[in-house]
Every structure is written in structure tokens, then in C-alpha cells.
Amino acid sequence: MSAPAPNIDLTIEAGRAEQHYWRDLWRYRELLGFLAWRDIKVRYKQAALGAAWAIIQPVVQTALLTFVFSKLAKMPDGGVPYFLLVLCGNLPWQLFTNAFNGAGNSLVGNSHLISKVYFPRLTVPLSSLAVALIDFAILLVIAIPTIAAFGIWPSWQILLLPFFLLLALIIALGAGLWLTALTVKYRDFRFVTGFILQVGMFVTPVGYRTDTLPNWRDLLALNPLTGVIDGVRWCLLGGRVEVHLPGLAVSILVALVLLVTGLWYFRKTERQFADVV
């Protein structure tokens, strides 16, 4: 017979949420897991192909980008099969878009919960990162054997893959915190998400490698996702793609700025969410 769950007393007092915010966030970790699991189940509910959609869309997108940039634009491949270049660039892009889109719309999507129950609101956008990670894991399981089929086997560089994935999630969370907090008050920002992702697709080196564009490399490095995509390619392709260290430094700096300022604005406006959502 299992032991009864311990009772947790929650005392509502003035200023408590501010004083014990991070401790409360840890105490509500089970809620974070529940929200993530709920979103995963709802995501593919009543879809005939289910979780296969996590694969179909990126595969079709990879095939189209390969055709556009290799056949039409005649971009150089640097000795790596072009399909693999796009595949390894599309993986972190899919992780970012899913995490950013999920975090950016998380508060409005859970307005029924936020307006009725107290809990650290940061739990909601954090849970959306877990959903993005699940989709990414499915893609990675398919991608690694595909890369190996082209004769490129994982090398020691793959050990650093978690660092670049964490960097992508930090960028997505920092930008998502800004967007979701602004969307609560100004619903116009719901349309900004799609616009940012459409434009971002072309200014992010998903379909081409940056080391073949020396005149544009410093400008492309201003996009924090450039360092992430270069790094993921470097990890998955066994070092066959160069990592631009100044670009990586910019990615780390911008990621930290986005995270710190995103947390600051989210915490500053958090107390108003229940009233205006």
C-alpha cells in the first residue's frame, strides 16, 4: 500500500509571492510536468497520423530548402551533401520555432487557468519548452541514422550538442517571455510571432552555410541563431563545418541578454496577468 502524499500548506500573505518566487517555482515543478504532458497529448490528439507530423513537416521543409538553395540558388556545399547541411540546420531551427511559438502564446492559451488559480506564471512558458524538446528528440532519432547513411558517423563533437541545444532554448525562452507578457496586454503580438518566424527563416542560415559567405558572415552573426546552427552542424557532421567563434560569442551574449531582460519584464508584469488575460 503506497504512503499517502504529504500535505502542503500554502499561506497567502502580502509580498509572499515576491519573497519566495523561485522556491514556489520549484515547489510547483509537478504542475510544470503536468502542463507539458497535457500539451504533448493535445498536440496530436485526433490527428490521423499522430506524432508523425513532428517528422513530416520538417522533412518536407528540408527537401524544399535543399532544392531551392542547391539547385536554384547554386549555393556551395563545401564537400558535404547539401541535404545534410539543410537537415542539420533545420533541426535547431525547428527546436527554436516550436519553443518560441509555444512560449509566446502560452499565457493566452492558458488564460482559464491563470485567472482562477495562483501559481508561479513562469511555469506556463517553461512547460512549452518540454514539448519542443520532445519533437526535437523525435527528429534527432531519425536524423542521426540518416546522416550515417551518407557515410558521416557521429564523432566526439556530438558531445557538445547539448550546449548548443541549451543555447537555442535560452534564446527561445528569453524572446518568448517578452512576447507572451506583451501578448497578454496587446493581442496584436499574436500576429508578430508568425511574422518573426517567416522573416527569421531567411536571415537564419538554415538553407546555407555561413563559411561560404565571408562577406556576409559578420552580419549574419548578429542573428543569435547563426551561432547555434553552425554549432549543431559542427556537432552532427563531425566537424566538417566550421564554427565561427565570434558569431558564437554573439549568440551567447544575446541569449543571456534576452533571458535576463525577458525574466525582468515577465516578473514586472506578472501580477497583472490574471486581471487582463
Image (spheres, rainbow, N blue to C red):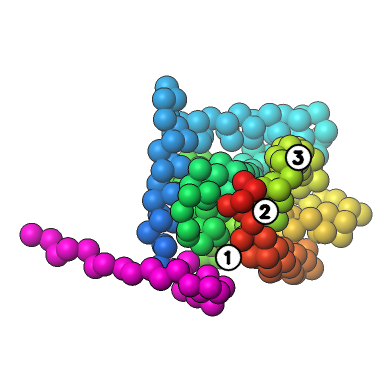
37 sits left or right of 102 in the view? left
Which stretch appears magenta? 1-26
Name the spot of residue 211 as percent of width and height, x first: 79, 55
| Residue at mark 2 | 181
* Amino acid type of the residue that numbered disc 1 sits on in the rendered structure: Phe
Residue at the right extreme of this rendering: 215
Helix, strand or loop: magenta stretch:
loop
Q: Nearer the viewer, residue 30 or 147?
A: 30
- For marks 2 and 1, the one nearer the N-term is 1
| Residue at mark 3 | 188
How packed mark 2 is, by other alpha carbons closer than 10 Å (few <14, some 14-19, many 20 or more), is many
Count of number-bearing discs: 3
- For marks 3 and 1, the one nearer the N-term is 1
Cβ–Cβ below 8 Å for labels 3 and 1? no
**Mark 3 falls on what kind of element?**
loop
Name the spot of residue 149 as percent of width and height, x first: 50, 41
Name the spot of residue 35 as percent of width and height, x first: 44, 49
| Disc 3 from disc 2: Cα separation | 12 Å
